[in-house]
Amino acid sequence: MSAFKKFLLVGSPNTGKTTLFNALTGLHQKTANYSGVTIEKYIGVFQYDNSQYEIIDLPGIYSLYSEALEEQLAIDEILNSEYDGLIIIINASQLEKHLLLVLQLLDLKIPSILVLNMIDEVQKKNWTIDIEQLKRLLKIPVVATNARKGEGLSQLKSSLSNVQISDTIFYELNFFDKHSLKLQSISSYKDWIQFYSKKQIPLSHLAEIVEEDLRYKHQLVNYIVSKVVDKKNFLNPYKDQIDKYLTHKVWGFLFLLLTLFIVFQLVFIIAEYPMEWIEWSMGSVSNWLQNYLPDTEWGNLLVNGVLPGITGVVMFIPQIALLFLMIGILEESGYMARISFLLDSVFSRFGLSGKSLIPLVSGVACAVPSILSTRTITNYKEKLITILVLPFMSCSARLPVYTLLIGIIFPDERAYGFLSIKGLVLLALYLFGLVMALLFAFIFHKVLPMQKKSFFFIELPSYKIPYWKNILIQLWNKVKIFIIDAGKIIVAISIILWYLSTHTLPSIQNRLNKKYASAIQVDSVKQAYQKELLENSYIGIVGKKIDPLIAPLGYDWKIGIALITSFAAREVFVGTMATLYSVNAEDDLIPLREKIMTARHTDTNELVFTTATSVSLLIYYALAMQCISTMVVVYRELKSIKWVIIQFLMMTGTAYVLAFLAHWWWS
């Protein structure tokens, strides 16, 4: 039987850690959440020389003295989990920055191997690194790699059987003892880090001890670099010249707007075709099943419950894939770090991070993948605020609702003879959503307790041509997570909604069966039966129950039903309206907008969709939480029903109040 060995892959961000992990394990990966949080660690396996190796890719860390949640989780894994050794990866061209972490890790006395990645950058700079001398100083194996091209991987794999504990002492225990008697129980550097991470030492002592340790190790780093690195004269003005413009307060924002415009257009334009194909394909399957399946309860469940739920999952895949593809390209090229750096000072005023930008912008396409992309935000408070306000951004699912209602209010009006009023109103709705997102972000920033002050620290990596294998592997992992985790819940909820909209109380069902029994197979009669069943279904009953609540907004019970059914997806509002306002078969030739514009209240005979009601609905759908998929993903990311409820009440409550004011103003 082959041997099994487990290694932790440890290193700072921007050292090529994920690239090395993907190069070693390929698609043989799975993900796991740390206990109690949604932060993920990736686990991969590979076979080499009759042995199986499991590699755990931990979140990037800069130091063992860290306050960041992701880094604390990685440190805890290093200190307390069981494994055979550490694979420590650093950027070979930045030894001065990364050797400090290496010395801290070696002081833990854990079997380790050091990987000098991006060795090609050292060669481009015409520098040399004396690897043999570095081995002698650190007393561990050292391997040079270029993970993007696969160089050095064979040597790394063969060296994993020879990992060893460094017997060089990089710390001095004597400086611990002078602070507290309690510190005398520390017998190793690992004990000290354990005490520090659990805050078991008086806070008055922490800063002085950490400062002394870091000062000592910085001296060692300078000594080691002086012995192993030979730097020739090398100037690279291009990176500095590019950053001079890309991080500029004016030019940087202009280039960012251009970049976001391109990303936004590509996500919409490219995703449109596969989404239409998926919609057509699933519709064809639905029609085929409807024609060939017997007219039974199970057939109805499959066609109108299960299949729409699956469609609701599959329809999101093109946008999710394209979104993460674009994010991957921006990250791999090095530009994402510049975006975050540029926007942090602006977003921090609203309690957001520079990393909140991409989720907010991509929320215009779909909130579901945008919430998933908040995993790049390491500060929990900033991630929480971003998730809570992100659904205010008008997503593509709102477009059918916007189009229908704007068309009712402004049929064919133009400003100055050429400007489309519809287009201007649509733009205003998108800007309205952004303003509301920033407003509530500011409120949450002031209300939520500041557990620790947030400092935005980011290392600007060198520019690179995107590594496509790395991007595609990450893309596959993200799509797989959505399909498996969020998809199964979305399908289950769709089935529940189907049941509530197609079933009613037994007494009502018996009455409908008797009323339509004689001619139920006639299309017009069947349509009337389905309409009356929907009105009297469990959802219909609820719609009439909430009629007093929605009447102040100008809505009738039919709109109330649409508000309920559109929780499955906002665009369901249009389909529900089409069903409820189709009076008989002759009306099939009448456009939906005309049916709605001429609809009247049954008791007063007044028009339902007045300007006041239509404006009220526009505002309501622009602000309300009308998406089960989004709520599911919010719960999955935050692991708390409390925040889902708070978000729902915040958005829907705000929507109700402003919709009421709009109806009152235009009445």
Image (tube, rainbow, N blue to C red):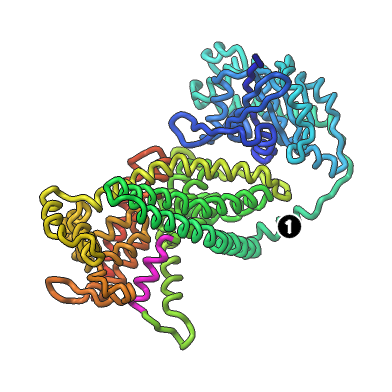
Residue 543, quarter of the rendered image: bottom left
Q: Which residue is drawn at 62% across and 64% down?
A: 258
Q: In which quarter of the image is the C terminus?
A: bottom left
Residue 594, quarter of the rendered image: bottom left
Depicted 636 relative to depicted 629: above or below = above
Q: Is residue 563 left or right of residue 243?
A: left
**Element carrying mark 1:** helix
Q: Give the range drawn in magenta.
A: 397-410
Specify the farthest residue to the bottom.
Answer: 417
Considering depth in this image, is 281 or 70 the residue closer to the camera?
Answer: 281
Q: Can residue 207 be seen in this view?
A: yes
Residue 394 is inside the magenta segment = no
Residue type beneath disc 1: Ile
Considering depth in this image, is 585 or 612 the residue closer to the camera?
Answer: 585
Depicted 60 relative to depicted 134: above or below = below
Q: Mark 1 points at which residue?
A: 242
Main structural element of the magenta stretch: helix, strand or loop?
helix
What count of labels does the image hold? 1
Q: Residue at x 38, y 45 (%)?
A: 491
